[in-house]
Image (tube, grey):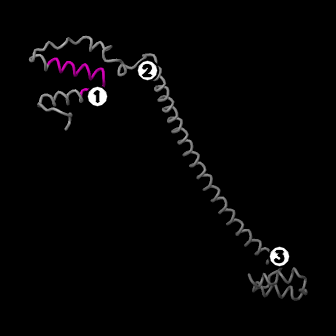
Amino acid sequence: MEALDKFHKALILGSLTEAEFRTGITESTGTSKTIFEVIGVALKEQEELTMNHGNKIQETMIAVNNQTTTTNNQVGALTVGMTGMQQQVQAMANELNTMKQQQQNQGTPKRNQPILDSKAIQGIKGYSGDRSEFRDWTEKFINIMSQVRRGSRHIMESMNKHIDQGKTGTIGQ
């Protein structure tokens, strides 16, 4: 092929005689072929190279198309997932708004009511002073207080325990 390239350059430059032309074809190909045969062989080699490159380009395009299809499918799945998540977030926002509206409609929450306004506190009988009834009255009072003020049960029970143990001073020490 190298000899054919040298011959081709000389031919283009126009520096070959007819005899050199015939001799050059014979030397470059190793046979006594006509110029048309040499050009035919070169064209066939070029066609094979072009076909190989065309096949590689086609394979690459198929791979790109397959990857594009896969990516589009993944994007579609993500879009569906995002739509579902958006619907869930919207449902939670609606529920939160409903809860806020209900809270506004109910007025002041019970935990902020004055203790004496509670019906439970109004229903308890006063302590009669009888020591045997003290435990029952104290349990009722603790239950009522825990209804009116959340978290007060622990405080009330700690105070009761402190008194039962005969301790004086600060509770919890």
Amino acid type, label 2: Gln
Horizontal side, residue 141 vs residue 69: left or right = left
Q: Residue, x 55% and y 40% (percent of image)? A: 79
Instruction: Answer with the quarter of the image where residue 56 lies.
Output: bottom right
Can you say which quadrant of the picture contains the C terminus?
top left
| Residue 94 position (above or below residue 3) | above
Q: Contact (CB < 8 A) between labels 2 and 1?
A: no
Residue under label 1, please give it: 151
Mark 1 or 3: in front is 1
Residue ID for mark 2: 103
Circle 1 SS class: loop
Within 10 Å of disc 2 (Cα), the crowding (few <14, some 14-19, many 20+) is: few
Q: Is mark 3 in CB contact (under 8 Å) with mark 2? A: no
Image-quadrant location for residue 170: top left
Residue 117 is situated, as x and y percent measured from the top left of the image, at 33, 13
The overriding secondary structure of the stretch rendered in magenta is helix
Q: Is residue 56 left or right of residue 167?
A: right
Q: Nearer the viewer, residue 158 or 6?
A: 158
Kind of residue at disc 3:
Phe
| Helix, strand or loop status at disc 2 | helix
- Residue 27, placed above or below residue 130: below
Q: Position of residue 50 (x, y in %)?
A: 72, 66
2 or 1: tag closer to the N-terminus:
2
Q: Quadrant of the N terminus?
A: bottom right
Q: Which residues are magenta?
A: 136-153
- The answer to whether 53 is drawn above or below residue 64 in the figure is below
Q: Which three-letter amino acid code belongs to the residue tagged 1?
A: Gly
Quickly name the residue at label 3: 36
For label 1, count other residues whose C-alpha is less than 10 Å away and answer few (under 14), some (14-19) or many (20+): few
